[in-house]
Image (cartoon, rainbow, N blue to C red):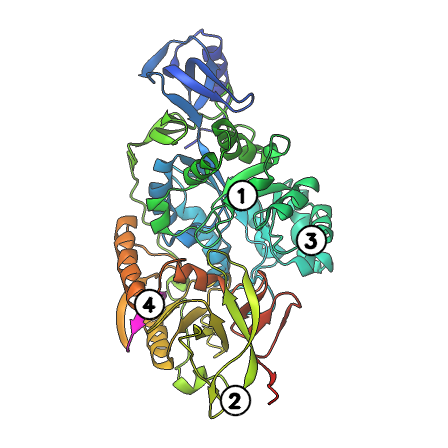
Amino acid sequence: MRLKLTMDRLKKRIAVAAKRVPADLVIKNAKIINVFTREILEDNIAVVDGFIAGIGQFEGYETIDASGKYIVPGFIDGHVHIESAMVTPAEFSNVVVPHGVTTIIADPHEIANVSGTNGIEYMLNASEGIPLEVLIKLPSCVPATPFENAGATLDYADLTPFYNHPRVIGLGEVMDYPSVMQNAENMLHKLIDAHSKDKHIDGHAAGLNGDGINVYMAAGIRTDHECVTSDEALERLRKGMYVMLREGSAAKDLITLLKAVNENNARRCLFVTDDKHLDELINQGSIDYNIKLAINQGLDPLLAIQMATLNAAECFGLKSKGAIAPGYEADFLIVNDLHLIEIDQVYKSGKLVAKNGKVTNSPVLKIEPDPSIVNSVKIKPLSREQLQIKIGNGSLANIIEILPNMIITKHLIEEVDSHKGLFQYNLEKDLLKIAVLERHKMTGNIGLGIIKGLGIKNGAISATVAHDSHNIVAAGSSDEDLLEAIAHTSEMKGGLAVVQNGKLLASLPLSIAGLMSDMQSIEIYERLKEITQALIKIGCTFEFNPFITLSFLALPVIPELKITDLGLFDVKTFRHIEIEIQKMMN
């Protein structure tokens, strides 16, 4: 939407600033949020060709009377995966723009793990010409680790051509810390490539101590969104990192991390959603929700807005974003109430794009994905015997314990029930079975494990959303329901399925890489409500979202214990381990 700066446009902008010619648009009687000085200034704003030409008394061809309402810079989501909302970029825009988000920094590593460069190209093409500005970070770790099987492998030579795209601004979250620390050649090439092109590099420092942060900073990695404690946040701030305060669907870290934020370090903090489901985006909001939550926790509203705008812009070197000031892009919101962040209107490049919670002009974009993207689920026939876990009577087992609303897990060791040398479900102890099936190349790989804390009493769930390799992940209270749920997921060419007593209760097809639907957001939202009711029927209490939690149990870069298509994975030692430990002594 932004017009390329030419000699004529620069002359015109200067002429408007000098009051020689009228502006395209003047907003009068505004309470301007100045994020540089954290003041509220009552003045007028002149806009020309999508940029702010000046603050003061101006004449314009069009005038808007703000009537004493607040003018706030457009919000920036500093790290988000569009695919996690299960919608196309155009539908994602329709959902988040009314919440005041005008720019996002998106990492398409979800679809890249399934479809490689075809997936990246699809996300770039599908995000053209929408009211939301989608800036892209190239996926740095496809696959995330060598301990699983993804649909693609991307090395530095695959990524390099994409840097020529004007909306590609850097290298996405580097989650393969061992490759950085050990100077793995392919990783070093990716880092050097980004540095040589003066591109920003995102980090992923889950569980790293000060020594690990030293390694990342030395490599030129400057951000982290994986802090889960205030001490971790302070460690990163003291080492010079930008800290991303995340409030998503699976990881809800914001309230805890705010304890680390103060007047001295807040300028190095910004807000992100990372992974947020469509229903929560619709019901709660996006970055506006982060701001409201921060204000409710006692943060000064002007400081919270500064973090969501100027801080994010400066973090990524977006020199013309994040403020209401001359020479900055005219991305702004008209807000009724500063404490409630009650958004009346949203403007992108000086044009009204949302009003009263709805987009004003939703472009109908139909970008046809490459055939490989919509035919991404390929598995071999599955039998009940393949889902059985061999374990001796009275044995101790390595168990994945779920921590509600967190993507980290606890490595639990407990005695489990067995019969004839096979693991037996224990619903009283909430010990269920989890399976990860490779679904990209028909290898037949099946990783099995035991989980505690998912809460299913009678049934099973299955999905092709399983970070980051996005194999099929399924969990439940019986082998029969597991088989049925997996079968439905495969038949849909990807998606979510809830099964009970061999019957499908609810589903959501995700035909685009098994991650996104080509339906409109309102249709997907209704299907998600049906899934919620089905989850309640099989026993879930919704202390957390079971599907979101399940999707992160297959991510082997987040502590402590996870599972891949190759089996149970100990993140602390970075190796696969057996389920069974030993026989208990009588």
| Numbered marks: total | 4
Looking at the image, is mark 2 or mark 4 earlier in the sequence? 2
Q: Residues within 10 Å of mark 3 (few under 14, many from 20)?
A: few
Looking at the image, is mark 1 or mark 3 earlier in the sequence? 3
Q: Is residue 316 visible?
A: no
In the foreground, 512 or 278: 278
Q: In this rendering, is residue 445 above or below 95?
A: below
Q: Residues within 10 Å of mark 2 (few under 14, many from 20)?
A: some
- Is residue 435 found inside the magenta-colored segment of the image? no
Residue highlighted by disc 3: 209
User: In the rendered image, which quarter contains the N terminus?
Assistant: top left
Q: In this rendering, is residue 530 above or below 582?
A: above
Tell me the amino acid under the disc marked 1.
Leu
Residue highlighted by disc 1: 245
* Nearer the camera: disc 4 or disc 3: 4
Image location of residue 332, percent across then percent down: 42, 27
Looking at the image, is mark 4 or mark 3 earlier in the sequence? 3
Residue highlighted by disc 4: 539
Looking at the image, is mark 1 or mark 2 earlier in the sequence? 1
Q: Secondary structure at mark 3?
A: loop
Q: Mark 4–mark 3 contact, CB under 8 Å?
A: no
In space, the residues marked 4 and 1 are separated at their CA atoms by: 32 Å
Q: Mark 3–mark 2 contact, CB under 8 Å?
A: no
Q: Secondary structure at mark 1?
A: strand
Residue highlighted by disc 2: 393
Looking at the image, is mark 4 or mark 1 earlier in the sequence? 1
Tell me the amino acid under the disc marked 2.
Asn
What residue is shown at x 56% (from left), y 23% (from top)? 36
In space, the residues marked 3 and 2 are separated at their CA atoms by: 39 Å
In space, the residues marked 4 and 3 are separated at their CA atoms by: 38 Å
Q: Secondary structure at mark 4?
A: loop
In the image: residue 10, left or right of residue 539: right
